[in-house]
């Protein structure tokens, strides 16, 4: 459930009409709902009730400082994958002991940065990385808490670009090699082995792959304990999918996911950590855009909107579906007609939807892309020299711009022409 509902024929974000935000900030813009973010975070917390746990929001899904502060103030931890994300989590007021550092290519600078600023744990993805963390921690005279990210060789049954748990993916340490690497970790200076980490992919709509992976983590934990390691924390990653199409059957709920965790690893006496991103932020955000033209083509009509693939890349990158709805509700008596919904960028790939049934729309009308709060603004670019779109946060009847639209001057000022040119 989200908090974007029609009220007297107009789409609202909580108690604020989207038309009001559009007048204030122009289009396109992203808008997020505090109530939805809060609700989704709490669903995970409740799903893990009874087990010692920390829900670490995957910052990569939406890294706006106001979003991070909203979740951090509720007690969320943060899962970061770069020094930049770490700095964001810190700037949003989240202490180091609630920040987990994941990612396959942590640099020496990033390792030193988080050891300096405080870190809950490193999720280590390879032996060379383990050695590098040990070297830097020992040189700094500190101890780095670590979990090894194991690759359980489980098919997550999701889009190939976002599956991470098969042995041919670049992620993690093959689970068959894990005992040997743990033994090495235990011998290294500056390293405190505390747990096991796994993340098999994103937008999973079936619980079976989670169950298979968590069972492997269970077996490994028991073996590692026999080997003498004090395994006291399990990080089970993120990945629970969301309903992108309201007409389709819904993916499993956090509570059902929580039951899988309880059933597979709940009795091991470990603290449970999870790293959800999409399920917390995805349906908490919309991308609102205006119709520029309706162009009648041969055999198909094109609705050209002022958002484009640079603002929301998921449809062109993954063939992803986003529900697209008019901000002013259409007259139910008028039959929707199929249109291709496209942006102004000069690529055929800049297509959001093909033959999508839509009510009649005219230039200037507003439409909203649903489920755009995760992997939306964070993946945007300035391709075609289109300035990044602003982000707005709603809370009840108030709203605020939480990232302003840059001016063209600001955009151009980042380039420089060498003196000799
Ligand atoms: N933890 C790790 C280590 C991850 O790599 C990811 C996502 C997550 C947690 C959060 O997964 P989530 O709960 O959001 O599914 N850009 C793609 C998604 C990429 C996901 C990358 N890793 C998309 O737009 O679908």
Image (spheres, rainbow, N blue to C red):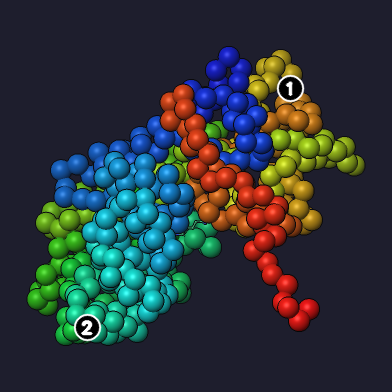
SS at mark 1 in the image: loop
Name, please, the residue furthest toward the right. 298
Residue 43 image offset from top left, x and y in percent: 31, 38
Place of residue 269 in the rendered image (x, y in percent of width and height, measured from the top left): 11, 56
Within-10-Å neighbours for mark 2: few <14, some 14–19, many 20+: some
Q: Which of 222 and 85 is in front in this view?
A: 85
Question: Does the image show residue 324?
Answer: no
Q: Quadrant of residue 59?
A: bottom left
Query: Which residue does the image show at 74% across and 57% down from the upper left?
Result: 384
Foreground: disc 2 or disc 1? 2
Is 420 on the left or on the right of 6, as rendered? Answer: right
Q: Mark 1 points at which residue?
A: 335
Quadrant where the image shows the C terminus: bottom right
Q: Is 361 or 338 nearer to us in this picture?
A: 361
| Circle nearer the N terminus (2, 1) | 2
Which corner quadrant holds the N terminus?
top left
**Residue at the disc numbered 2:** 138
Q: Calculate the distance from the C-alpha at mark 2 to the C-alpha at mark 1.
A: 69 Å
Q: Does the residue labelled 2 lie within 8 Å of ligand 1?
A: no
């Amino acid at each position: 459930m989200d908090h974007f509902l029609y009220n007297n024929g107009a789409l609202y974000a909580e108690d604020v009409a989207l038309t009001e935000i559009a007048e204030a900030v122009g289009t396109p813009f992203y808008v997020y709902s505090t109530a939805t973010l809060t609700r989704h975070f709490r669903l995970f917390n409740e799903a893990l009730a009874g087990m010692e746990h920390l829900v670490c929001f995957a910052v990569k899904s939406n890294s706006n400082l106001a979003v991070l502060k909203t979740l951090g103030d509720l007690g969320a931890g943060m899962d970061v994958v770069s020094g930049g994300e770490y700095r964001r989590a810190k700037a949003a007021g989240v202490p180091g002991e609630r920040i987990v550092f994941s990612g396959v290519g942590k640099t020496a600078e990033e390792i030193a940065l988080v050891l300096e600023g405080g870190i809950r744990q490193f999720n280590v993805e390879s032996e060379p990385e383990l050695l590098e963390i040990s070297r830097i921690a020992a040189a700094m005279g500190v101890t780095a808490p670590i979990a090894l990210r194991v690759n359980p060789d489980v098919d997550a049954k999701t889009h190939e670009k976002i599956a991470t748990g098969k042995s041919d993916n670049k992620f993690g340490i093959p689970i068959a090699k894990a005992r040997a690497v743990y033994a090495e970790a235990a011998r290294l200076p500056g390293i405190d082995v505390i747990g096991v980490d796994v993340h098999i992919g994103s937008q999973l709509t079936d619980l079976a792959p989670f169950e298979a992976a968590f069972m492997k983590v269970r077996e490994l934990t028991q073996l590692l304990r026999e080997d003498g390691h004090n395994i006291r924390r399990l990080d089970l990653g993120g990945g629970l999918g969301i309903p992108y199409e309201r007409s389709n059957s819904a993916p499993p709920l956090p509570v059902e996911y929580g039951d899988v965790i309880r059933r597979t690893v709940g009795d091991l006496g470990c603290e449970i950590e999870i790293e959800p991103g999409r399920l917390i932020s995805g349906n908490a955000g919309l991308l609102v855009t205006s119709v520029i033209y309706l162009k009648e083509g041969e055999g198909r009509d094109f609705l050209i909107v002022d958002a484009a693939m640079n603002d929301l890349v998921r449809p062109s990158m993954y063939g992803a579906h986003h529900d697209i709805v008019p901000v002013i509700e259409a007259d139910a008596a008028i039959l929707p007609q199929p249109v291709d919904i496209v942006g102004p960028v000069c690529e055929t790939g800049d297509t959001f939807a093909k033959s999508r049934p839509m009510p009649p729309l005219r230039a200037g009308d507003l439409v909203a892309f649903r489920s755009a709060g995760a992997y939306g603004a964070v993946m945007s670019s300035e391709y075609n020299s289109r300035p990044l779109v602003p982000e707005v946060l709603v809370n009840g009847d108030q709203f605020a711009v939480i990232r302003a639209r840059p001016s063209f001057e600001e955009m151009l000022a980042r380039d420089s022409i060498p003196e000799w040119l």
